[in-house]
Image: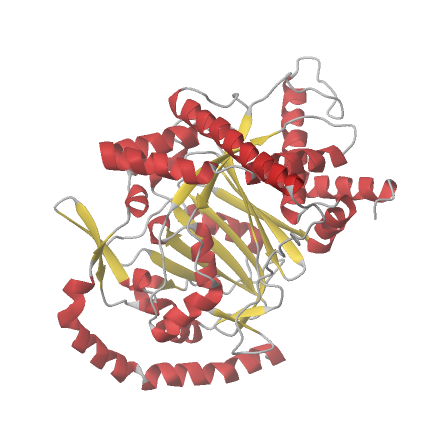
Amino acid sequence: MESTNSFRLRKQALKPIETARSSASQRDEEVSKNNGQRTCEEEPLSPSSRLYHEPNFNVYVIAIMGCKTRIYPDVVKANLGHTLLRHPRFSSLQVENNGEMRWVPTEVDLERHVIVPELDQNMDSPDKFLEDYVYNLSKTTIDKSQPLWDLHLLNLRTSQSEAVGIFRIHHSLGDGTSLLSLLLACTRQMNDSKALPTIPIRKKKDKKSDRIGIWRILLRFWFVLQVFWNTVVDVFMFIATALFLTDTQNPLKGLPGSESTPRRIVYRTVSLDDIKFVKNAMNTTINDVAFGMTQAGLSRYINRIFSENKKDGGATETNNLPKSIRLRSNLLVNIRPAPGIQALADMMEKDAEVKWGNWIGYVLLPFTIAVREDPLDYVRNAKAIIDRKKRSLEAFCTFYIADWALNLFGIKAASALSHKVISRTTMCFSNMVGPVEEIGFCGHPMAFLAPSSYGQPYALMINFQSYIDKMTIVLSVDEGTIPNPHQLCDDIVESLQVIKDAALTRGLA
């Protein structure tokens, strides 16, 4: 017997399907009217978008969406027709002509973009099948004869969901934050089918102060001096990395050519309330806690590797690490504010013009790998590093350095510069904020969201993604470098529990 949710879904799905069918003729008329205008609608790809077509930067963004009900492909296709396809990048080809790549509008055949494989519902391990499916997907690319995105719908009951949707989007279509915002703009709240998801906005601290006159001027001068000095140091480190400075060889650092290897994507879900508990207890941010528990998890994992490699079989609970390990994460930051969910939804509804694209700057984020007696020190150290990075214009400066290299030396030189900076660091790390209430994709209630990517020139990428009261930790790894990604994921999850227990023990709650 069908569940109440499935019955409600099919009932709600009638309206969008009918709307799509009734408007089909109108769209055909619009297409025929616009055919003569398509040449003038063509526009060149931005330099950053062109960068993602270089052989060593062919990156795809993956978004794994767990659903609480069976997925109905006809419902999804009908909704895509009047949501995602209204975005020009998702209905355009990337065509090269005389050495220049341009966006060329085209007709989208959803049968080529929405893939629904036939599955054995009695398979032994659906979770392993899903993991292998994504792994095999990372071995492939999308044919350039169509817009560079596809959606795989798997009616497969896993440990966390009744069905799974896998969005795959070429990075040239936009940066990760913009693409996730666009995806969320195609969803609606389950308790209000017209309401967009609510994304929490960090409250700005009250800038009112009792300090007046000369003290306020001195504080502002000191802040400007800090920003200037931090920026100079960060830009110097960026240039040094581009020229010669590389991370210490460590168990997480990939070998040359990592960008061409398939990726094993694994994820775990933890309580967002546990992270908030540590955040409130230590007066930090969720970013600080996520960074701190990751530092702790990586330290546990690397320490275990070194203990196993010792001839005398060192104990895993003792410090077996080298005296110093330089391990940095490369953050690709969109320096132009990403379009909000409301703006993207308006664009798809009203054809409004919204800024889009990849305006990417680099931030080199150092990870401290150490065995600490006090687990809370991982979070304290993380807060200090992040607070310092907030007082730097590193992302803007590195963007303009890369832009200068592109304009002066061409796309090949800019690609080489970016590849050197990324390949000389160890990993990528990000934390993205998700909806605070349950949402539905084309009417299908979502259980979790796990974004990641493949094609990047490092062996490890870690993404944190919040959704309602949960946080999903997603790892994308090159198994040739990290053969046991589940262990690494478990180490990060267990580190959160250790940090939380330490906060409870010290009565910080």
Q: Is residue 340 above or below residue 129?
A: below
Picture coordinates of residue 231, whole percent (x, y): 49, 32
- 493 or 399, nearer to the observer: 399
| Colour logic | secondary structure
Can you see residue 466? yes
Return the residue found at the far front.
213
Q: Is residue 278 above or below residue 39?
A: above
At horizontal 38% and vertical 28% (from top left) the residue drawn is 420
Q: Quadrant of residue 338?
A: bottom left
- 192 or 341, nearer to the observer: 341
**Could you tell whether 46 is left or right of 193 in the image?**
left
Q: Quadrant of residue 501?
A: top right
Picture coordinates of residue 439, whole percent (x, y): 56, 69
At horizontal 63% and vertical 18% (from top left) the residue drawn is 309
- 34 or 203, nearer to the observer: 203
- 495 or 178, nearer to the observer: 178
At horizontal 48% and vertical 34% (from top left) the residue drawn is 459
The quarter of the picture where the N terminus appears is: bottom right
Picture coordinates of residue 246, whole percent (x, y): 46, 22
Q: Quadrant of residue 104?
A: bottom left
Q: Is residue 15 above or below residue 313?
A: below
Can you see residue 486? no
**Could you tell whether 326 is left or right of 58 in the image?**
right
Picture coordinates of residue 258, whole percent (x, y): 41, 32
